Image (tube, rainbow, N blue to C red):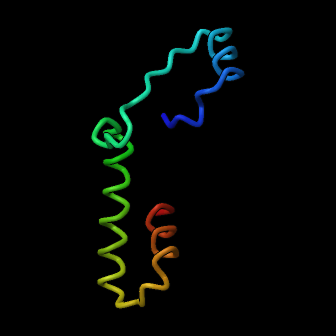
Amino acid sequence: MGREWFNTAWEQYRKDQGLVFQFTTLYAHQQNGTAEHSMCMILDATRSAMAESGMPLKYWANAVSTVVYT
């Protein structure tokens, strides 16, 4: 979880609701296994789609959207 969720108002809400957060080490992406795996799969599929289609790189965002949708 990013540090954007670390502030006093959220901390009080978290305690009131009984939520427990575990922050990861900064720049240690390997600690975010599920998210990293998903991103790798999306990027691999996008690269394959772009290479197979021969489309110019300006369509990269469209290819990512298509891969995520499918």
Q: Is residue 70 left or right of residue 43?
A: right
Residue drawn at x 36%, y 32% is: 25
Q: Position of residue 58 (x, y in %)?
A: 49, 85
Residue drawn at x 30%, y 83% is: 51
Q: Position of residue 7 (x, y in %)?
A: 64, 26
Q: Is residue 20 left or right of residue 46?
A: right
Q: Position of residue 53 (x, y in %)?
A: 36, 87
Q: Quadrant of residue 55?
A: bottom left
**Measured along the vertical axis of the image, is residue 10 above or below residue 46?**
above
Q: Quadrant of residue 44?
A: bottom left
| Residue sitting nearer the eye, 52 or 25 | 25
| Residue sitting nearer the eye, 22 or 26 | 26
Figure disc tally: 0
Residue drawn at x 35%, y 43% is: 27
**Measured along the vertical axis of the image, is residue 28 above or below residue 51?**
above
Q: Quadrant of residue 6?
A: top right
Q: Position of residue 3 (x, y in %)?
A: 53, 34
Residue drawn at x 29%, y 75% is: 48
**Measured along the vertical axis of the image, is residue 22 above or below residue 37?**
above
